[in-house]
Image (tube, helix red, strand yellow):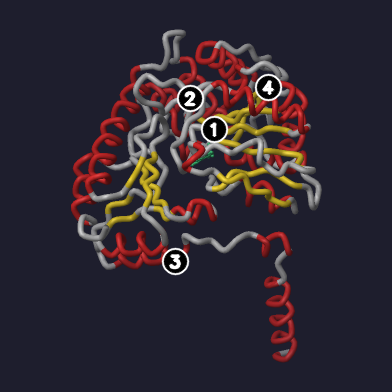
Amino acid sequence: MRKFSKQKCLVTTRLTTERTQRLDRLPKYLFSEMEKAVLEKKSRGIDLISFGIGDPDLPTPDFILSTLREEISNPKNHNYSLSQGELEFREAVAEWYKKRFRVDLDPHKEVLALIGSKEGLANLARAYINPGDKVLVPDPAYPVYANGATLLCDGVPVVMPLLGKNGFKPDLEKVSKEGAKLLFLNYPNNPTAAAVDRRFLEELVDFAQKNRLVVCYDNAYSEIAFDNFAPQSLMQIEGSKEVGIEIHSCSKTFNMTGDRIGFAVGSEQVIGNLSQIKTQIDSGPSLYVQKAAITGLRSYTSNGPPECVRKNVATYQQRRDVLVKELRSLGLQCETPKATFYVWASCGTDSMGVSKRMLEKGVVVTPGIGFGKYGEGFLRFALTIPIDRIEEACERISNIM
Ligand code: PLP
């Protein structure tokens, strides 16, 4: 009996270690060493100032919270929701696009609710990528395009370098597109904070048409923009609905990262295919979350965002100005971002080494190498901490650079 349980144990152990090749193909998680060091410091009660997390510290607007409170107490809102999102939510998205971008969308065919945009990005590849298919991904980038989407579908990421000399935009003329089926791009950009103009979006649509690519344009930061800059939508470009979709999120616009609600819009075929994938995997976002997001989206007018979004942006802008000034005085070069809540600062080389030295001083930043090979030599600072802490952090790292 004893022998039997030992054997059984061995079999179980072997099975649990036999992971799929696709899981093994995921790159080493570069932040884990940093995360361990951060946890260790926290457990010793060390005061850390963190620029590391792209999660707003500002509160969810009161009017959204009060809708959430009201809707969550209605038992009907605890049933399954439609996989593609409730029609009222999709209509609110279409109205928002009309007000914000002057774009017409059919809420029945061209809008899909997402349980946060991350899920939509990852699931889209399931609809388009067969094993071995190539996917064009930016580098540095939000890691989901290469990993959660491409590698987990047994696809092959083909890197489009985002270089400072090109304004952190891909040089579409030089991109090796042979056989690629799908392309991800994201502006305003995480992590470089770069933004693009209408001309670039036109080139992108043209490039996709010529090369028969499906485009997934991630516009999650379109509402966090400064100095009267208003990022555009890919959907404003003629022909965009034939080549792909745009992904959005309420996470950053309304400080709702934990509520998990986003949306995809655009090509009827792409939306239909993504929707079909999702029906096999999940249901729609919680009904009370959809209702809260509707209130947020409908708070926009044709004159622009509501007061709460304007206030958020003004806060990030003040923080940006302080941080950019401080970093430059420390000798770290950086552009003044036109959008997003990130500052992308050049640190020479060895971004991991510099980040570790900063951590020793109690300051957490994200090493650029964690966003891809072309992120090396940069640090990402998230503007998700108040000004007095930004100043204190810069004081702490003043003798490092
Ligand atoms: N896209 C980009 C570029 C991001 O930086 C993030 C989150 O940081 C997301 C998408 C995911 O946002 P969510 O899943 O919260 O909508």
Q: Earlier in the sequence, mark 4 or mark 3?
A: 3
Q: Are marks 2 and 1 in contact (CB under 8 Å)?
A: yes
Q: Secondary structure at mark 1?
A: loop
Q: Which residue is mark 2?
A: 292
Residue occupying the point 60% across, 25% down: 201
Marks 4, 2: nearer the viewer: 4
Alpha carbons under labels 4 and 1: distance apart: 24 Å
Asked if 169 appears above or below 44 in the picture, the reply is: above
Left or right relative to 34: residue 247: right
Between 320 and 283, which is closer to the camera in this rendering? 320
Marks 3, 2: nearer the viewer: 3
Left or right relative to 136: residue 198: left
Marks 4, 3: nearer the viewer: 4
Using the image, tell me which numbered label, if any, was put on residue 333. none
Q: Tag 4: residue type?
A: Ser
Q: Tag 1: residue type?
A: Ile
Residue occupying the point 75% across, 27% down: 209
Marks 1, 3: nearer the viewer: 3
- How many neighbours does mark 4 have within 10 angstroms: few (below 14), some (14-19), or many (20 or more)? many
Q: Which residue is mark 3?
A: 33
Q: Earlier in the sequence, mark 3 or mark 2?
A: 3
Q: Which residue is mark 1?
A: 261
Q: Which residue is mark 4?
A: 240
Q: Tag 3: residue type?
A: Glu
Q: Secondary structure at mark 2?
A: helix
Q: Position of residue 107 (x, y in %)?
A: 66, 17
- How many neighbours does mark 1 have within 10 angstroms: few (below 14), some (14-19), or many (20 or more)? many
Q: Position of residue 295 (x, y in %)?
A: 47, 19
Marks 4, 1: nearer the viewer: 4
Q: Earlier in the sequence, mark 2 or mark 1?
A: 1
Q: Tag 2: residue type?
A: Ala
Q: Secondary structure at mark 4?
A: helix
